[in-house]
Amino acid sequence: MDSKHQCMKLSDGHFIPALGYGTYKPQEVPNTETLKATKLAIDAGFRHIDTAYAYLVEEEVGQAIKSKIAEGRVKREDIFLTSKLWCTFHRPELVQDSLKTSLKKLGLDYVDLYIIHFPVPLKPGEEIFPTDEQGKTLFDTGDICATWEAMEKCKDAGLAKSIGVSNFNRRQLEKILNKPGLKYKPVCNQVECHPYFNQSKLLDFCKSKDIILVAFGALGTQRDKKWMDLSFPVLLEDPVLCAIAKKHNRSPALIALRYQVQRGVVVLAQSFKEKNIKENVQVFEFQLTPEDMKAIDALDRNLRYLPAKFTEGHPECPYADEY
């Protein structure tokens, strides 16, 4: 792999490209955009593609990958593909079938990484966000350790090369790490992470356990009104980021991505614009100075753009703890 595909070693021996293309999209964006943009991302040099059952775009992501394989641009083994176990499938007997459903949609035999999307179980069924008449989330009772054992079986079955988690706090990670009879530990924890919410405590903890932190929302999220308060400041308009961008003759987005790479974080970038997609792969072409890094560290204001309100009120709501 060339420099475009700088990789980090996971605790199970596999390698994850340090830059990934995120495929979450707001509802109003048509799925055809995901198909088009994922193809553009592969053409631009992205080799790590991140998707999820709950994004409802697995078919398009799979089509994009398969079309690029058919063109001879990439081989399946060149692509590092992540998908995620949704909250309505936490019951151990549902885990493997859910992954098989995702693989069927993707049209592929395996994913490179399968992760538990949230530590909060929701009522099983077809609804992504099951609610009662009052619109309150319908939770399920469940044991995250039992769900993890089912994830381990997915790895043993060859359906996923690596397994990890997303949106877990320190306590929840420790619960799995300290589980009696643990066979595989989570290789990663994918969380919201950007200069306004730099997750330094969680990052230090993960590094101490050889768990890779994967950053989503690294560019300040897509500002989807369904998920966030639109009055929050726009990350990429931050004067400090803009000044550092000017100094390096790069975009603020590239500065935000480079910041994560230099901290040892795998970073996801999401865009539907060809110009931005092509630009984002330039993250390995320059370096920030220690002063730049310090200035960006100082921007942290503990601002979570995506509070995942549907998890509130459940004992495993991941954001109730400090980190």
Image (cartoon, rainbow, N blue to C red):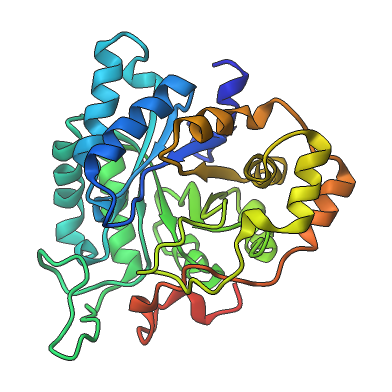
Residue extending farthest top: 72
Q: Relative to residue 59, is residue 232 depicted above or below? A: below
Q: Position of residue 305 (x, y in %)?
A: 52, 68
Figure quadrant of residue 66: top left
- The N terminus: image quadrant: top right
The answer to whether residue 132 is seen in the rendering is yes
Q: Residue at x 84, y 54 (%)?
A: 294
Residue extending farthest left: 126
Residue extending farthest right: 291
Q: Residue at x 80, y 48 (%)?
A: 243
- The C terminus: image quadrant: bottom right
> Residue 84 vs residue 14: left or right?
left
Q: Relative to residue 55, is residue 245 depicted above or below? A: above
> Residue 315 vs residue 297: left or right?
left
Q: Position of residue 127 (x, y in %)?
A: 14, 67
Q: Position of residue 259 (x, y in %)?
A: 70, 45
In this view, the residue in front, 322 or 52, is 52
The answer to whether residue 16 is seen in the rendering is no
Q: Residue at x 22, y 50 (%)?
A: 56
In this view, the residue in front, 202 or 281, is 281
How many numbered marks have been drawn onto this rendered protein structure?
0
> Residue 22 vs residue 204: left or right?
left
Figure quadrant of residue 300: bottom right
Q: Residue at x 54, y 74 (%)?
A: 231
Q: Position of residue 69 (x, y in %)?
A: 29, 16
> Residue 174 vs residue 255: left or right?
left
Q: Relative to residue 181, is residue 155 depicted above or below? A: above
